[in-house]
Amino acid sequence: ETGVTQTPRHLVMGMTNKKSLKCEQHLGHNAMYWYKQSAKKPLELMFVYNFKEQTENNSVPSRFSPECPNSSHLFLHLHTLQPEDSALYLCASSQDLNGARDEKLFFGSGTQLSVL
Amino acid sequence: SQQGEEDPQALSIQEGENATMNCSYKTSINNLQWYRQNSGRGLVHLILIRSNEREKHSGRLRVTLDTSKKSSSLLITASRAADTASYFCASRNGSSNTGKLIFGQGTTLQVKP
């Protein structure tokens, strides 16, 4: 295992539901990320947190709301989603954000989300 | 626009053969990384090559980097059915100290037993 745990593994929700995705890392990392992976598209970076502070919001619609209560936990709150939001949502962590160093990402197994 | 683009998009080989995947990128980089993803799972880091390195080995993996052509290749030797997965390159913009890691679309590799 990578040390990054995501729950749930699968989620089916209607467009009017509210649900949350959870991510927890046991690696002592300071940076955490949400990525969206749709079929036939590259991974899309959604949000980045460093030391609990959001450092990047990649023009993500407000129906996705991240929360990072501490460096080990990351949530993605979902409400009034659209069918096109169906995708695999991946959480990742890294030691920190310093791109000049050899930072690599550790990914969770993802939440496969289906919006009906 | 995406930083990395892999080629080919799909590759099917027989067990025992070598598999070569290529990646091109657009801006200067600090390092380039390769990741593997089994179907429906998260990505797993395979190998990292720094911008001042030209070749790196890890087990059956060999990665090359040509900064003049802004390209990298991943070679898997003596492939096994268990190597069946998608492979992604990822790179950081070298001009930024907090450059985000940008992934390509990936190469889907199928190794037939």
Image (tube, coloured by chain):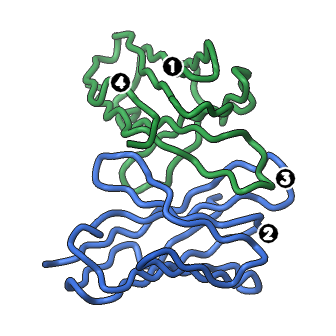
Residue visible at 75% across and 30% down? Answer: A55
Alpha-carbon distance for marks 2 and 4? 36 Å
Q: Which chain is green?
A: A
Residue B44: image x %, image y %?
44, 53
2 and 4 marks on the same chain: no
Quadrant assignment, res A27: top right
Local SS, label 1: strand
Alpha-carbon distance for marks 4 and 1? 10 Å
Local SS, label 4: strand
The quarter of the picture where the C terminus of chain A appears is top left
Q: Are marks 2 and 3 in contact (CB under 8 Å)?
A: no
Residue visible at 37% across and 83% down? Answer: B19
Local SS, label 2: loop
Q: Amino acid at mark 1?
A: Phe
Q: Are marks 1 and 2 in contact (CB under 8 Å)?
A: no
Q: Which residue is mark 2?
A: B28
Residue visible at 54% across and 81% down? Answer: B73
The image's mark for residue A7 is 4
Residue neighbourhood size for the residue with mark 2, other residues' Cα within 10 Å, grouped as few (<14), some (14–19), many (≥20): some
Alpha-carbon distance for marks 3 and 1? 27 Å
Alpha-carbon distance for marks 1 and 2? 33 Å
Q: Are marks 2 and 4 in contact (CB under 8 Å)?
A: no
Q: Colour of chain B?
A: blue
Q: Which residue is mark 3?
A: B96
